[in-house]
Amino acid sequence: MSAQAARIRRLDPAAITGVMSREVANFRTFWKATTFSSLLEPTIYLLAFGLGLGATVVNKVNGLDYVEFVGTGMVATAVIFSSALPAMFGTFVKHRFQRTYDAILAAPVDVEELVTAEMLFISLRAGVYGCFPLLVSFAFGLDPTPGMLLVPLFAFVTALGFAAFGIAVAGTVSKIDQFNYVTTLVVTPLFLVAGTFFPIDQLPEGFQILAQLNPLHQLVELVRHAAFGFEATDLLRLGGLAAFSFAMWRLAVRQMTRRLVD
Amino acid sequence: MNELDPSREAIALRGVVKTFGPITAVDGLDLDVPTGICLGLLGPNGAGKSTTMRLLTGQAIADSGELRVLEYELPAEAKAARAEMGVVPQLDNLDIDVTVEDNLAVFARLYRVRDVAAAVDRALDLARLQARRKAAVDELSGGMRRRLLLARGLVHEPRLVLLDEPTVGLDPQIRTQMWTLIDGLRSRGVTILMSTHYIEEAERLADEVAVMAQGKVVARGRPSELIVKHAGRETAEVYGPPDRLAEVRAAAEAEGLPVRPAGPAIAIVGAERSSNGSVPEDAVRRAASLEDVFVLLTGEEAE
């Protein structure tokens, strides 16, 4: 192997940042619309659930005002919707319709670097947008705490897993319509059984066990604990999320290699 | 840098086979591209040209055979080989909302170019797009986009360039602009492998032509050599009603002269060899062409 070949190593940071620079260049063209909807969506949810449901049906949940309960829980909603869905649709469109990946893989970039870069960029974005519900919640009465400074990290780690999940799905389906199965059968149940809008201890026991396996539920718990006091098990939760993200990363690399290399 | 002996091959393929299920796209392909030439890979759709291009970038893995590109073994060293080659794809896959200069800068980074700004400037000069550097790709004309696509593949000054049907679907004026750019590359000593199914493109740009059919090279040489070897000196085109064309065809084939369809006419190839009057007197005689060779060897109408 030549010197040049030796310099171009596995998971080369130059390749990863190069791919991410493409994402940044594109994101600069549509960030306003994305940011607008990321701010408006939690506002609408908090108005509807927090003020509407909270004022008329539910007052306190697990000792928290319903606005505080929903506002902290909605970080998970923002994370999955700003990671899994853009990863699924973005990856499919870039591969199938825009042929972007053909161009990138003709450069000294391999599929592992491509997937890693896409995951990292989506997750950085989701880490920021995931915090928007908290920021909006401050306007609705949630008090800021020092622990909340860790929320971007929790959101980022979780988003890595869901971005990789979305990429893996995009590398598996043959038609874009098949995403409907994934959103209906996977994303929506995960989002609903995360403890965002109601505590999972009110669910039947089987669902409670399933909810514990739901990465979004673990994120909800971490965010609530960041706002209202950490617990000893939170390190385990974070470790679980990191393991989920690692497993999804490897799956995404495998599926995309099958898809992109004949 | 992995220095090549100029006398050696920039690309060397031996017995390369690539199948997709029951379809054999590349079937025992042997292909050498010496350093510094422009080799035209000429073949009809489905001949295996695009698959060959993907094999050379490691985006397809051969079932068997040996592949060396710029002295790198593929697929193991495909990434290192790609660092030293440029690829211009058949389909426009530019980022259309992004500016011209950002499209180039992204690829300069992907190719690990140290001075990205200088590389972008150089590529803009080459594509004559300096004045549009801040424009989004979506605002460019078709010709400008095609030139940008070429400049993107050259942003890191590669030693080897793969052009996959570089002018497919373009109008004649834009095609001529692209030919001028490609010709400029060739004169600077860049090795070029250009797949095309346009005869004129191969004749105008390629030092040598390899004709591909059914996944392998069926003829190789300079265009003039191929014409003399496979089509002789002269082709006679005969026009008339179908019954008459059938008679003329039968007579020519009985004399051992190859005959091919040529739109409303038939073309008798190697007409100068006729000695028994099988070529009618009213036939239109012209110099044999690469198109005659292409159709004879591939059985397909040329474009």
Image: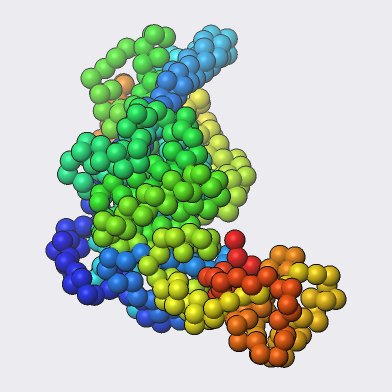
Residue B98, relative to residue A114: is it above or below? above
Q: Residue at x 46, y 64 (%)?
A: B203
**Residue A162 horizontal/vertical position (percent):** 42, 42
Residue B297, relative to residue B1: is it above or below? below
Q: Toward which corner of the image does residue A212 lie, by quadrant?
A: top left
Q: How is the image coloured?
A: rainbow
Q: Residue at x 22, y 75 (%)?
A: B7
**Residue A64 horizontal/vertical position (percent):** 41, 17
**Residue A99 horizontal/vertical position (percent):** 47, 48
Q: Nearer the viewer, residue A205 or A215?
A: A215
Q: Residue at x 45, y 81 (%)?
A: B28
Q: Toward which corner of the image does residue A147 lie, by quadrant?
A: top left
Total count of labels = 0
Residue A246, relative to residue B74: is it above or below? above
Q: Residue at x 46, y 21 (%)?
A: A33
**Residue A248 horizontal/vertical position (percent):** 39, 50
- Residue found farthest to the front: B281
Kindly tell me whether residue B54 is visible in this rendering.
no
Side of A51 relative to A252 (left or right): right
Quadrant the C terminus of chain B occupies: bottom right
Q: Nearer the viewer, residue B112 or A256?
A: B112
Quadrant the N terminus of chain B occupies: bottom left
Q: Nearer the viewer, residue A166 or A101?
A: A101
Side of B210 relative to A3 (left or right): right
Kindly tell me whether residue A32 is visible in this rendering.
yes
